[in-house]
């Protein structure tokens, strides 16, 4: 079936003023001003109420943390004290059942904001949660999002001088064996893949050097991406200097991680030389503006990173350090904090959208999503300007960011509608809210 998405208010694409034509889930025509489709279409969708963007791509999250939003033990704290407060609570309460609900809710919330592809950095593996990646694969299929199953890991606990409790880490051999299992089962490198896999040792203060190095070996064997937290806080710099006698980027290089397979979460505390080295190696950086502000971690040097050659993407980060999973809101936050970092003229809404679409897709190593172009997958977000917050807006695309778009009216993934009239097509959100809220109460009862 050939579908014409016709006459949007505005569209974030060149030469598509009258819309696009989709066939078999792929964009096959861009319709410019005054033009009609070159070939007959089977169906037309009137997009005259909609501003259309490429589907947003989330490159860093922790889905299970939806269960501890605004937790009384963790509010008003910076990263390390925040983690010290929450690790014991997560260790005691994250079960397969509520992990499934946390994953479903995060995926649904992301999709409702206009997100069409997501990566979740899951690193918490208490006894009983060994099937975490399988659960996420099932839930991604159920909700309808494309997903990079980011098999995280921790093997340095408090007894080893690390940060997490002993009960949430695994040994190296167990981790590596499961990484290979997940890669063999789910990693799909074909165009339009719904599931891919990345390997993601959590952070320098939670994993061993051997685990970092062996992850590189597996990534090369299976042609997958690598991900970790790096440069998020000054505390991390101090830890690396004390434990490894070097800064985090030096440690990354020692582990064999300065290469184009890698994208990093946060990337705040890099000096000029480190940015140059990261750019030369084409290492991606996921900018997490909302989390960085909530935890007062600092300001990512996005413009310098891009100029050096780093792909820069966008992530909502964990739903506890952010307290929501709304990616279009993070687009707005990215614009605001980067204007504070630089100036109003140097950072535009187009920059913020680029980070959330093409930049994020590059971080994930995907060339088939992240833009509305010929041959790309038909992944798009459709926003209306009907709410009071948009009344009087002159530039529709800028309005989505400056006036604070919050929910997509429609979402399309691979040519299929997954959100219609602001409601997911495959999820009962009232039921999900009830079930997830009931599960989250147990995390408060552990106080």
Image: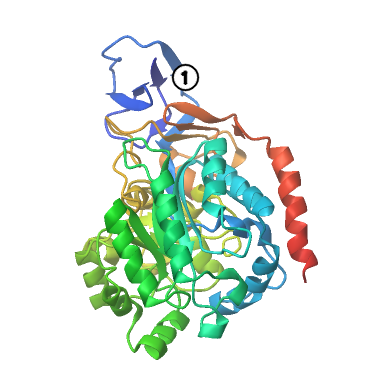
- Badge 1 density bin: few <14, some 14–19, many ≥20, Cα 10 Å: few
Residue at the spot 60% in from the left edge and 34% down from the top edge: 424
- Number of marks: 1
Residue drawn at the location 63% of the way across and 59% of the way down? 128
Q: Nearer the viewer, residue 33 or 327?
A: 327
Determine if residue 302 is in view: no
Between 82 and 228, the one nearer to me in the picture: 228
Q: Quadrant where the C terminus lies?
A: bottom right
Toward the viewer: 19 or 389? 19
Q: Which residue does the image show at 28% across and 18% down from the upper left?
A: 34
The residue wearing badge 1 is 46
Residue lying farthest to the left in this orientation:
280
Q: Seen in the image, is 444 located left or right of residue 144?
A: right
Tell me which corner region of the image, top left, top right, bottom left or bottom right, holds residue 190.
Answer: top left
Q: Is residue 18 above or below residue 225?
A: above
Give residue 46's position: percent from left, percent from top: 47, 19
Give percent across and percent down for residue 436.
71, 49
């Amino acid at each position: 079936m050939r579908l014409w998405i016709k006459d949007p208010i505005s569209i974030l694409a060149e030469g598509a003023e009258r819309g696009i034509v989709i066939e078999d889930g792929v964009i096959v025509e861009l319709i410019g001003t005054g033009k009609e489709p070159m070939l007959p279409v089977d169906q037309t969708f009137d997009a005259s109420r909609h501003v259309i963007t490429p589907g947003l791509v989330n490159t860093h999250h922790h889905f299970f943390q939806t269960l501890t939003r605004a937790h009384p033990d963790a509010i008003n704290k910076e990263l390390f004290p925040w983690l010290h407060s929450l690790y014991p609570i997560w260790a005691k309460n994250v079960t397969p059942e509520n992990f499934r609900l946390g994953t479903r809710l995060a995926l649904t919330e992301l999709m409702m904001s206009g997100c069409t592809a997501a990566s979740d950095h899951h690193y918490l593996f208490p006894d009983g949660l060994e099937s975490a990646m399988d659960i996420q694969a099932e839930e991604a299929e159920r909700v309808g999002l494309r997903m990079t199953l980011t098999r995280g890991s921790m093997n340095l606990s408090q007894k080893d001088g690390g940060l997490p409790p002993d009960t949430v880490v695994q040994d190296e051999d167990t981790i590596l064996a499961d990484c290979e299992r997940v890669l063999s089962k789910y990693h799909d490198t074909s165009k339009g893949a719904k599931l891919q896999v990345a390997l993601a040792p959590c952070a320098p203060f939670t994993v061993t050097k051997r685990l970092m190095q062996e992850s590189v070996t597996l990534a090369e064997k299976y042609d997958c991406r690598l991900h970790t937290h790096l440069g998020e806080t000054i505390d991390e710099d101090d830890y690396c200097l004390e434990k490894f006698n070097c800064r985090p980027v030096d440690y990354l290089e020692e582990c064999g991680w300065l290469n184009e397979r890698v994208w990093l979460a946060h990337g705040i505390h890099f000096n000029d030389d480190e940015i140059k080295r990261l750019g030369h190696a084409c290492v991606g950086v996921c900018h997490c503006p909302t989390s960085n502000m909530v935890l007062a971690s600092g300001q990512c040097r996005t413009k310098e990173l891009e100029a050096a050659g780093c792909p820069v993407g966008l992530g909502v980060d964990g739903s506890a350090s952010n307290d929501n999973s709304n990616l279009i809101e993070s687009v707005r936050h990215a614009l605001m904090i980067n204007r504070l970092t630089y100036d109003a003229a140097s950072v535009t809404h187009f920059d913020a959208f680029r980070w959330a679409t093409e930049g994020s897709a590059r971080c994930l190593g995907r060339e088939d999503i992240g833009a509305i172009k010929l041959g790309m997958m038909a992944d798009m977000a459709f926003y209306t300007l009907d709410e009071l917050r948009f009344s009087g807006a002159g530039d529709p695309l800028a309005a989505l960011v400056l006036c604070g778009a919050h929910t997509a009216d429609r979402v399309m993934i691979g040519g299929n509608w997954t959100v219609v009239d602001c409601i997911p097509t495959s999820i009962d959100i009232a039921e999900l809210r009830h079930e997830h809220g009931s599960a989250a109460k147990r995390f408060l009862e552990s106080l």
